[in-house]
Image (cartoon, grey):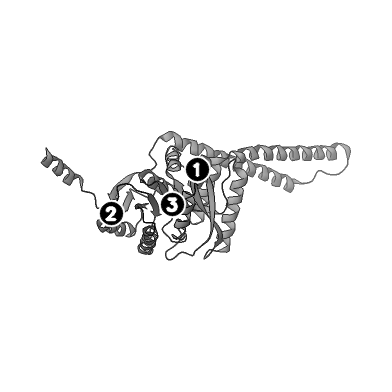
């Protein structure tokens, strides 16, 4: 195999034992048709099943396979970042291990990359095998994100994409802790093009993005690229304060110029609760931003690699020391 790697394929995985063998087979088949040197970077994001052990075995006899074994679950976006840090290819492809994104589309991405595009991303025109709630919330998120941010983040796109080496190097310079990779790719710019496709149903296993993780990813995306929620708090504050002032004038008018009894204790309580709820929501939004500032100031690494298997199983520390002694 050539020492120069043309393509790096990053495959983050978390408990994908049921599908990882087929994932390896299909991606290897697709990349083999390119006729150029490639590497498959599997990133184990703290899996508790046997998918990491399976990929480790592949490294014994397939020198194109590499395994980045993280010390615990750091999250999908961090796993992608680890893969980019270790990648060597002129072009870097990011694809999930669940096979919802068809590996065969990589060939179309490579074709567009050779035509001069530095970023080629896959845009979903249909999502098979997902609930109506998942489809609706995903669609809503992308459109809220587009409205909230000052950069153009394509709607209905995930992390399935090809990026040029120069784009990868720029992304490696961005040290953010709460990462939203697809947003960062849009932020760095360069020539970008979409390829439309229909997303498949999961071949096996369960989704690794339940509602809780989707909400966190949404918050990471919005707070990383926009401060409009903070501006919205100011606008709503002015609106509610004005409405409260007008209501107060109405109550004073009734008390001073009419014989009507001042009613509405229930409505007053309702308004008070509404204002208090608004204040707490705004405190929560401020807390999200402050919490992210706190994360950035800690200075901790984004991830910790427990083991790295490159082409073949790495020697243990003891074996390396013995080899060094024998050379001396």
Count residues near mark 1 (Cα–Cα under 10 Å), then give few for <14, some for 14-19, many for 20+.
some
How many marks do you count on the picture?
3
Which mark is nearer the camera, 2 or 3?
Answer: 2
Disc marking residue 234: none
Q: According to the image, label 2 marks what residue?
A: 63
Dot placed on the residue nearer the N-terminal end, 1 or 3: 3
Dot placed on the residue nearer the N-terminal end, 2 or 3: 2
Count residues near mark 2 (Cα–Cα under 10 Å), then give few for <14, some for 14-19, many for 20+.
some
Residue at the (71%, 40%) spot, across then down: 240
Disc marking residue 94: 3
Q: Position of residue 113 (x, y in %)?
A: 47, 49
* SS class, disc 2: loop
Whole-angstrom CA distance, mark 2 to mark 3, is: 20 Å
Residue 75 visible at all: no
Which mark is nearer the camera, 2 or 1?
Answer: 2
Q: According to the image, label 1 marks what residue?
A: 184
For the residues bearing labels 1 and 3, Cβ distance under 8 angstroms: no
For the residues bearing labels 2 and 3, Cβ distance under 8 angstroms: no
């Amino acid at each position: 195999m050539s020492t120069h790697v043309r393509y790096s394929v990053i495959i983050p995985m978390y408990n994908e034992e049921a599908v990882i063998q087929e994932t390896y087979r299909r991606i290897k088949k697709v990349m083999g048709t390119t006729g150029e040197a490639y590497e498959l970077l599997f990133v184990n994001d703290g899996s508790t099943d046997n998918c990491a052990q399976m990929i480790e075995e592949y490294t014994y006899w397939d020198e194109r396979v590499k395994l980045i074994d993280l010390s615990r679950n750091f999250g999908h976006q961090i796993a992608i970042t680890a893969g980019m840090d270790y990648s060597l290819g002129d072009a870097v492809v990011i694809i999930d291990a669940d096979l919802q994104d068809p590996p065969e589309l990589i060939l179309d991405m490579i074709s567009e990359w050779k035509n001069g595009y530095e970023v080629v991303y896959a845009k979903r025109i249909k999502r098979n095998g997902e609930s109506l709630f998942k489809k609706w919330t995903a669609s809503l998120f992308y459109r809220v994100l587009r409205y909230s941010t000052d950069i153009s983040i394509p709607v209905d796109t995930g992390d399935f994409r090809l990026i040029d080496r120069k784009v990868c190097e720029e992304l490696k310079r961005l040290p953010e802790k709460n990462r939203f990779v697809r947003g960062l790719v849009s932020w760095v710019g360069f020539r970008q093009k979409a390829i439309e496709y229909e997303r498949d149903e999961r071949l096996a296993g369960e989704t690794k993005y339940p509602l809780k993780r989707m909400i966190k990813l949404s918050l990471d995306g919005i707070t990383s690229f926009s401060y409009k929620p903070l501006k919205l708090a100011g606008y709503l504050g002015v609106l509610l304060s004005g409405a409260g002032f007008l209501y107060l004038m109405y109550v004073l008018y009734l008390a001073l110029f009419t014989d009507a009894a001042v009613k509405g204790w229930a409505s007053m309580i309702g308004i008070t609760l509404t204002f208090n709820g608004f204040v707490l929501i705004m405190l929560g939004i401020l807390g999200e931003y402050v919490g992210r500032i706190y994360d950035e100031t800690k200075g901790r690494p984004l991830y910790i690699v427990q083991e790295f298997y490159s082409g073949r199983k790495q020697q243990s520390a003891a074996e390396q020391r013995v080899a060094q002694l024998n050379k001396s």
